[in-house]
Structure formats: structure tokens, C-alpha cells
């Protein structure tokens, strides 16, 4: 069984914001400020934009396939959003993996749906609910209660909104590094400063935290025994050591 743990990073979709609010002539920074202000008017406090107003700038993944493990960010730092999304769905078509996320059902996947709609990215394997593959009728990527997409935050909370927890805190609770380098709320500022490489690195560490929590989840539900969990964890450590990248070395150093 192939496993793909993933995470996305987003910034305001200023192009759509400019059209919706008639903001021609304003800079991207100023358009984003208007979008944030209008969102605060709607919520009374939060300026976190609605899903369809997010633009994807990074998608990072941990792929466990056959005997290998890979940690990377899709595309290149200068790849277009359409290319990133196309690569994501192409990976699903190629590997038919179990998708693993933290709040992917509540955020990452709906954002990807809207952006695929914008760019016209075809993904028949992802959208299949049994029309092409009968097995997908009972286990597909779209149903909240199917395991082909396992949203760890949703599952571990027992699908109770009052019981959800942040990825960072659960990761640290079980001895993982948690958030490193930045926080999601800082991505827009980092992007404006041209730090897309740092954003991709940060996204990779979030995907790593998610994958390692998934290994613990596999342990508690009996799909891995202690020896299997240790073997899979050791493979992650070896993969990060062999990669010899500064942000992955920092993750290793912080991993208790």
C-alpha cells in the first residue's frame, strides 16, 4: 500500500480579490489588506480567508511506496500554481495512495478543489466514487468517513469539532519537532519577501510531522507492531540523514 502524507501552503488570491472588490490599480499587498479587512468584517475577529480565496504556493509530501521513502516539495520554486496542482493529482493517478493529512478535509483538499477548478486540472482518479473503479464506491478520496483519505485531525478527534487539536501540539506531545522555521500565518509575508524556498522547507517539515503521527496512528490501531513502527521510523531518520539538507537536519536534531 502506498502512503502519501501531504501539506499545502497558501497566500491570498489577490487576482480574484482584485476582481471581486474592484481594486484595479492597487498593489498585491494593498489588495490583500483589503481582503483581510473585509474578512474581519464578516467574522468579527479572524482575517483567515475563505477557502476559494487561497492561492497555493507550495505542496510538500512524504511518499512511502514499495521499499522507498521520499520527502520533497512538488515542482520547482518558480513553478506555477497550475503545475503544482497538476503534479499533485498526477501522483494520485500514478500511485493511488492512501492520502494522509492534518485537517486536509477541512482545508487543504477544498482549496485544491477550487484551484483545480480555476485552472481546469483534470483528476479522474481522485474524483472517482465508483464509476470507474468499483472499489472506490466503498473507499474513495471524497467521503469523510473513508480511509483512502485519512484526515488525522478529524479521525483522532472522533469527528468532534470541540476535540480537534493543532498539528504542532500533537507532534510535540509525542516527541516530534512540530512547527519549524515559521508559522502558516507568516507565509504571506515570507512570500512577499521572496522566500519561497523557506516556505517549501517549512511545508516539508509539516508533511513530515503528519507522516510520523500517521505511523503512531498505525501503531495504535494495530496495523504496525512495535518492531514495525520502529523500522518505519528508522527509515524516516535514514532518509533525512541521506538527504543532508539543512532544514531536514534541523528536524532530525529536534526529533526526540
Image (cartoon, rainbow, N blue to C red):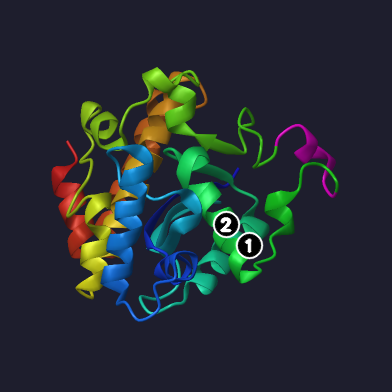
Q: Is residue 60 left or right of residue 221?
A: left
User: Residue 116: percent from the left, percent from the top?
Assistant: 60, 62
Query: Disc 1 vs disc 2: Cβ atoms closer than 8 Å?
Result: yes
Residue 127 visible in the picture: yes
Residue matched to label 1? 117
Write down the quadrant of residue 187 in the picture.
bottom left
Task: Identify whether 50 is placed above or below 18.
Answer: above
Is residue 162 part of the magenta span, yes or no? Answer: no
Q: Residue at x 39, y 50 (%)?
A: 49
Q: Nearer the viewer, residue 26 or 114?
A: 26
Residues at marks 1 and 2, CA–CA distance in whole angstroms:
5 Å
Q: Secondary structure at mark 1?
A: helix
Q: How many numbered dots are placed on residues in this image?
A: 2
Q: Is residue 103 left or right of residue 251?
A: right
Q: Which residues are magenta?
A: 132-139
Residue matched to label 2? 114
User: Residue 73: percent from the left, percent from the top?
Assistant: 39, 64
Q: Secondary structure at mark 2?
A: helix
Amino acid at each position: 500500500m502506498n502512503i502519501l502524507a501531504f501539506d499545502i501552503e497558501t497566500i491570498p488570491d489577490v487576482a480574484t480579490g482584485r476582481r471581486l472588490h474592484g481594486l484595479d490599480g492597487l498593489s498585491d499587498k494593498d489588495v490583500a489588506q483589503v481582503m483581510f479587512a473585509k474578512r474581519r468584517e464578516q467574522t468579527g475577529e479572524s482575517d483567515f480567508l475563505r477557502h476559494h480565496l487561497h492561492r497555493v504556493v507550495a505542496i510538500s509530501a512524504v511518499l512511502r511506496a514499495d521499499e522507498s521513502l521520499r520527502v520533497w516539495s512538488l515542482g520547482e520554486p518558480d513553478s506555477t500554481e497550475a503545475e503544482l496542482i497538476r503534479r499533485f493529482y498526477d501522483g494520485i493517478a500514478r500511485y493511488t495512495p492512501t492520502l494522509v493529512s492534518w485537517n486536509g478535509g477541512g482545508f487543504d483538499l477544498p482549496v485544491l478543489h477550487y484551484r483545480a477548478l480555476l485552472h481546469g486540472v483534470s483528476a479522474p482518479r481522485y474524483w472517482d466514487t465508483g464509476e470507474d473503479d468499483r472499489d472506490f464506491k466503498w473507499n474513495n478520496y471524497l467521503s469523510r468517513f473513508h480511509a483512502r483519505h485519512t484526515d488525522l485531525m478529524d479521525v483522532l478527534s472522533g469527528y468532534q469539532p470541540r476535540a480537534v487539536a493543532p498539528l504542532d501540539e500533537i507532534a510535540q506531545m509525542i516527541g516530534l519537532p512540530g512547527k519549524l522555521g515559521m508559522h502558516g500565518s507568516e507565509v504571506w509575508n515570507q512570500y512577499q519577501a521572496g522566500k519561497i524556498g523557506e516556505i517549501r522547507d517549512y511545508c516539508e517539515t509539516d508533511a513530515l510531522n503528519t507522516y510520523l503521527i500517521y505511523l503512531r496512528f498505525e501503531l495504535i490501531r494495530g496495523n504496525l507492531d512495535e518492531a514495525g513502527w520502529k523500522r518505519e521510523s528508522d527509515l524516516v531518520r535514514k532518509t533525512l540523514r541521506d538527504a543532508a539538507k539543512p532544514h531536514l537536519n534541523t528536524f532530525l536534531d529536534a526529533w526526540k
